[in-house]
Amino acid sequence: MFPIFLLGLVIVGLVSSIRSLFITKYSRNQSISLENVILHLLIYITVLMGFGLLYMVLDVTGHPVLIENGQVLQGNYFEKIASSMYFSAITLLSVGYGDITPIGIGRWLAIVEALLGYTIPVAFVVRMVINIERS
């Protein structure tokens, strides 16, 4: 029961963080602000950690989603969470290295995470353009 609750909590956190990309608060005379840069950095961190936790929770509940060297992730919880966070970071920030591969539902999660990785910078640029045009 607890892993399902944790999974729901992680999903709510991810949706809330991603939603904040599209809800903007504009202020006058502000084109590029430190607040916007920090906001987007925190959104990256939240998405990275959220997807890493999703991979980990699915693995703990008996649904392996990542394989490394042809085998389902092995080791204790700390090693699994480290591998899940690593895979999440590589998927979100680049095209991936291929050393850890998603399987099953993990493939779809990785696709969504990669698309978000491309969307976040676009949202940042659009916000800056809107702020510049308004000032």
Image (cartoon, rainbow, N blue to C red):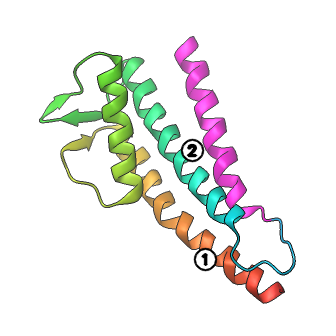
**Residue 125, disc:** 1
Residue 11: % across, % down: 60, 36
- Please tell me which residue lies in front, 23 or 25: 25
Residue 33: % across, % down: 71, 70
Within the image, what quadrant is residue 86 found in? top left
Marks 2/1: CA–CA distance: 19 Å
Residue at x 77% of width, y 88% of height:
133
The region drawn magenta spans 2-24
Q: Earlier in the sequence, mark 2 or mark 1?
A: 2
Against 121, is 130 above or below? below
Against 112, is 132 above or below? below
Please state if 63 lies on the left or on the right of 44 as rendered: left
Please state if 118 lies on the left or on the right of 101 as rendered: right
Quarter of the image with the C terminus is: bottom right
Residue 71: % across, % down: 15, 29
Callout 1 amino acid: Val
Can see residue 24? yes
Residue at x 28% of width, y 35% of height:
66
Quarter of the image with the N terminus is: top right
**Residue corresponding to mark 2:** 46
Which element is circle 2 on? Answer: helix
Within the image, what quadrant is residue 107 found in? top left
Q: Residues within 10 Å of mark 1 (few under 14, many from 20)?
A: few
Can see residue 65? no
